[in-house]
Amino acid sequence: MGYRILIVEDDAVLAGGLCRALHNENTETVSSKTLGEARELLKECQDKGTQFALILLDVNLPDGNGFDFLTEVKKKYGMFVIMLTANDMEADIVTGLEMGADDYITKPFSLAVLRARVDTQLRRMGQQYGQAAGQLQHEPGQIFVIDDYRFDFAQMQFVHHEQKVELSKTEQKLLRILVENRGITLTREQMLDYIWSVESVFVDENALSVTVKRLRDKLAMQERIKTVYGIGYRFE
């Protein structure tokens, strides 16, 4: 699974150039010229249970202030944000960083510098969420909405049919790795290592089967959490 970058920029020529410059086999780019469009794109992703890895956010937009949107995005989604603006005043840069921006790039800039700054943030995201070659995929989004399920891992709130469901820490870890790797068959070894990697004691493989059964029962996910016999499990 690759990265998805949202570019919020009202200059159509610049936005198109940024999309082309950052798009590659591992990175998909999507642009929005207003905050309203950006909110719709974020909501669409949330409804699908996915999320963008990074936002490139202009400060001055036709329908609002990028700083306000930065606060909104950080609070609701917790994703990485690079501010992109013509404002090179020190006060603006400090304000953006203090409000949670992960980086701040002022126009004009070279595409080589931009790519390097973006790559730095994607590496940070990978380190924070455990992404690396050969490892399981971890998305930065804390909230997943899938049909009549809503999983908020930051607040540890799990809802099915508008009813809260209590999950143990182990069940939460299991659920997270499954939903973050939707459609991918995970081996039992991968899951055991992820869920109990910090445990100093030996964990019997039967513990995984028991935890999967509990999670299925609590969330009525018998049809969603599929057993792939001889291999592991997959979240449909």
Image (cartoon, rainbow, N blue to C red):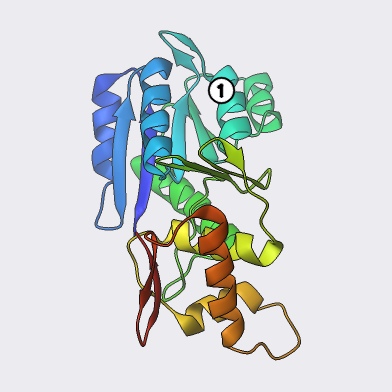
Which x, y percent locates residue 232? 41, 79
Graded by Cα atoms within 10 Å as few (under 14), some (14 to 19) or many (20 or more), the crowding at tag 1 reads few
Residue at (68, 24) in percent of width and height: 95
- Determine whether, in the image, residue 38 is placed left or right of residue 151: left
Indicate the quadrant where residue 111 lies: top left
Is label 1 in a helix, a strand or a loop?
Answer: loop
User: Which residue is at the far right?
Assistant: 200
Please state, as top left, top right, bottom left or bottom right, where the C terminus lies in the image: bottom left
Residue at (38, 74) in percent of width and height: 227
Establish if 168 lies above or below 202: above
Which x, y percent locates residue 110? 37, 39
Out of 211 and 23, give the one closest to the viewer. Answer: 211
Establish if 10 lies above or below 46: above
Which x, y percent locates residue 177? 51, 63
Out of 5 and 156, give the one closest to the viewer. Answer: 156
Q: Which residue lies under the disc numbered 1?
A: 88
* Total numbered circles: 1
Residue at (50, 62) in percent of width and height: 216
Residue at (41, 62) in percent of width and height: 181
Which x, y percent locates residue 194? 58, 74
Can the viewer see residue 102? no
